[in-house]
Image: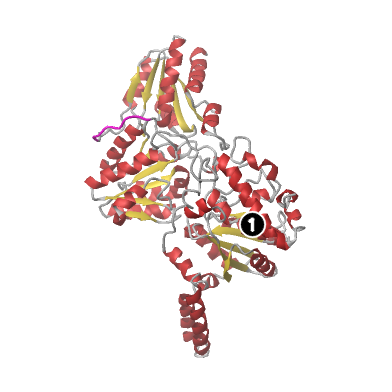
């Protein structure tokens, strides 16, 4: 019987002999690799955290002790050890296990986590609540080195050191973000793990500081500063944490010894462990970025099982950026640890001096771009829609308020499928259109995307351009760029019964719905709105007088989105109006096909809802 099959809850793990834990780690890796090869998912990160997860559950007592994971894409081993082994094959499938921690799924998941840099803050809150309620348990935050570049993590460290509560922070240093590690903190951690230099400096500094410590308060202060320079780990000490490490993150004996020791310590403690992303699966070790988030793949070769598809919107954006930048040397690219995911890797390869990856720091990315724009450059900030939510204040206060010409590229806008509610980009139309001076646009296809890019670059104020995840429609691209008139929509089909106004990825399903309606003798006008802000008010008012009723379609929450904008415009027209979009709820995970069908965002769905609305006189 496999060792993993004996573990149905964390308490079962403690019954396994310590010398068998490495074998358990092998079994967990095999299970993760086999499952993700069929379901897709975050493979490399979870493989790198297997021993760390085993050691945590072997020494601590979940769910009594609270383990708070950062981001959550490293938690597959955690799911296997906390009662979800028999459902693991449903990972990221509709109705199955979430790809991220989810308290509704297990009492061992203490916090919903899909965005980076939140674990220390949440864990500190739990530690304070524990103390106020006079309870007794440990709180452990597991944070990746990439997440430590987020300002939220440093705010939490600062507060934790000040409050001095019992809190354990495990810095899981896999020397990667999603893409390669960027920034000063990366170099800082590298200094810590430079073994020979570290030990040599340790001995010299100890002798030096011993002599200096008797020379008065002033020199003692200087000594502390020297100590921080010579010992990167002293950063955590100065923040109020006891720092331990760095330790080999795949040595189970060492990890369990360390955790056992730390369990008896009081106050905030930081344990620095060094792991390898993709550990135990050669293709993932060789290409950790590709295997960070991957679809179905062949286990033997590591090659993707995906069928040939049209070129993705992301790739169209990336290559369009390069073309535009060749003609305009003021264009610079900015992203937040997502150069490959956003397609800016093409731009970075050709214009390395004009490309800036700021790490997992979306708020900083936006204000940084504001500084670039205020100094005469044309920054293009490419961030996933779901992550742009983290910079909402900066978009309004630091860009829109000053009417700075920053272009925001919102990749993965709309439903994103199996990653679920933490990653669906379904709020951007709503929050971007609230900012004065902001232009909000979305292309119906990849050809229109390149023209909107050209238009956005030429605009003298802020622009938000959003497009969906995945492949385009296979539309042939024009060789020359065309400038689109800001705020002008495009009538694609004319009819007198109903007008369907669609935005972005919903335009072609709206055209399909119009064909189905025509079979029922319902003639529909279909409009590619192009812009959510400013709306083509003249056209919409004209349609309001021409047709019997009007329908809006968007892959965004209806609340505050495109449909809301049209409703606001026509509030005094007395026209029957129907908004099709996503409801006021967090959308579950599942395939794009299933989710779009469920929420009526397909040609058939738009047809059904529109027909019912037209006939319900």
Q: Residue at x 36, y 19 (%)?
A: 543
* Residue 476 painted magenta: yes
- Relative horizontal placement of residue 230, taking residue 246 as reference (left or right): left
User: How far from the left and from the top, in percent, is residue 419?
Assistant: 54, 41
Q: Which residue is more in the foreground, 531 or 286? A: 286
Report the residue at 67% width, 65% height from top.
256
Number of numbered discs overlaid on the protein picture: 1
Among the 4 quarters of the image, the one containing residue 527? top left
Magenta portion: prevailing SS class: loop
In the rendering, at what x and y percent does residue 536 appear? 33, 28
Q: Is residue 84 visible?
A: no
| Residue sitting farthest toward the top | 521
Examine the rendering and report whether any part of residue 375 can be seen: yes
Q: Dot 1: few (<14), some (14–19), or many (≥20) neighbours within 10 Å?
A: many
Q: Residue furthest right?
A: 15
Tag 1 secondary structure: helix
Mark 1 highlights which residue? 53
The outermost residue toward the left is: 327
Q: Is residue 471 above or below residue 346?
A: above
Q: What segment carries the magenta color? A: 474-480
- Residue 118 screen position, x and y as percent: 55, 54
406 in the magenta segment? no
Q: Nearer the viewer, residue 348 or 232?
A: 348
Left or right: residue 489 compared with residue 155: left
- x, y percentage for residue 44? 53, 51
């Amino acid at each position: 019987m496999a060792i993993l099959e004996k573990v149905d809850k964390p308490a079962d793990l403690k019954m396994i002999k310590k010398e068998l834990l490495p074998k358990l780690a092998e079994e967990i890796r095999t299970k993760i690799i086999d499952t993700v090869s069929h379901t897709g998912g975050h493979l490399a990160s979870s493989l790198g955290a297997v021993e760390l997860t085993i050691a945590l559950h072997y020494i601590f007592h979940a769910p009594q002790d609270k383990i708070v994971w950062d981001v959550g894409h490293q938690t597959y081993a955690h799911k296997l050890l906390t009662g979800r082994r028999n459902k693991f094959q449903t990972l990221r499938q509709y109705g199955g296990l979430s790809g991220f921690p989810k308290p509704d799924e297990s009492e061992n998941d203490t916090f919903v986590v899909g965005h980076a840099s939140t674990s220390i803050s949440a864990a500190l809150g739990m530690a304070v609540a524990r103390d106020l309620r006079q309870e007794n348990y440990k709180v452990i935050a597991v944070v990746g080195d990439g997440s430590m570049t987020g300002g939220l993590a440093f705010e939490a460290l600062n507060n934790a050191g000040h409050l001095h509560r019992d809190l354990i922070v495990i810095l899981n240093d896999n020397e990667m973000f999603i893409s390669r590690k960027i920034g000063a903190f990366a170099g800082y951690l590298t200094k810590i793990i430079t073994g020979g230099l570290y030990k040599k400096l340790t001995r010299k500094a100890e002798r030096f500081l011993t002599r200096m410590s008797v020379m008065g308060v002033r020199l003692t202060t200087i000594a502390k500063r020297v100590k921080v320079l010579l010992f990167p780990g002293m950063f955590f000490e100065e923040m109020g944490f006891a720092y331990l490490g760095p330790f080999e993150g795949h040595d189970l004996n060492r990890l369990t010894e360390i955790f056992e020791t730390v369990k008896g310590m009081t106050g905030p403690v930081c344990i620095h462990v060094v792991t390898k992303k993709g550990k135990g699966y050669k293709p993932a070790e060789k290409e950790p970025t590709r295997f960070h988030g991957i679809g179905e793949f062949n286990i033997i070769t590591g090659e993707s099982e995906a069928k040939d598809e049209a070129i993705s919107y992301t790739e169209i954006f990336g290559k369009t950026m390069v073309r535009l930048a060749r003609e305009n040397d003021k264009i610079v690219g900015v992203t937040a640890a997502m150069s490959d995911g956003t397609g800016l890797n093409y731009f970075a390869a050709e214009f390395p001096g004009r490309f800036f990856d700021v790490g997992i720091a979306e708020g900083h990315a936006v204000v940084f771009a504001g500084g670039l724009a205020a100094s005469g450059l044309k920054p293009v900030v490419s961030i996933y829609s779901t992550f742009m939510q983290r910079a909402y204040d900066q978009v309004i206060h630091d860009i829109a308020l000053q009417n700075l010409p920053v272009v925001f590229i919102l990749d993965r806008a709309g439903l994103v499928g199996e990653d679920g509610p933490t990653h669906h980009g379904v709020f951007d139309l709503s929050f971007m259109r609230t900012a004065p001076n902001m232009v909000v646009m979305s292309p119906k296809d990849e050809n229109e995307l390149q023209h909107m890019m050209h238009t956005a670059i030429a605009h003298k104020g802020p622009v938000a351009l959003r497009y969906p995840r995945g492949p385009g429609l296979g539309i042939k691209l024009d060789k020359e760029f065309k400038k689109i008139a800001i705020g002008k929509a495009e009538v694609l089909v004319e009819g007198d019964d109903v007008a369907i106004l669609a935005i972005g990825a919903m335009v072609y399903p709206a055209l399909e719905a119009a064909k189905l309606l025509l079979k029922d003798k319902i003639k529909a006008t279909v409009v590619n709105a192009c812009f959510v802000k400013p709306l083509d008010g003249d056209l919409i008012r004209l349609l309001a007088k021409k047709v019997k009723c009007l329908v809006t379609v968007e892959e965004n929450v209806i609340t505050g989105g495109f449909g809301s904008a049209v409703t606001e415009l026509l509030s005094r027209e007395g026209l029957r109006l129907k908004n099709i979009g996503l409801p006021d709820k967090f959308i579950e995970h599942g395939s794009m096909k299933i989710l779009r069908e469920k929420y009526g965002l397909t040609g058939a769905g738009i047809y059904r809802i529109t027909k019912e609305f037209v006939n319900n006189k």
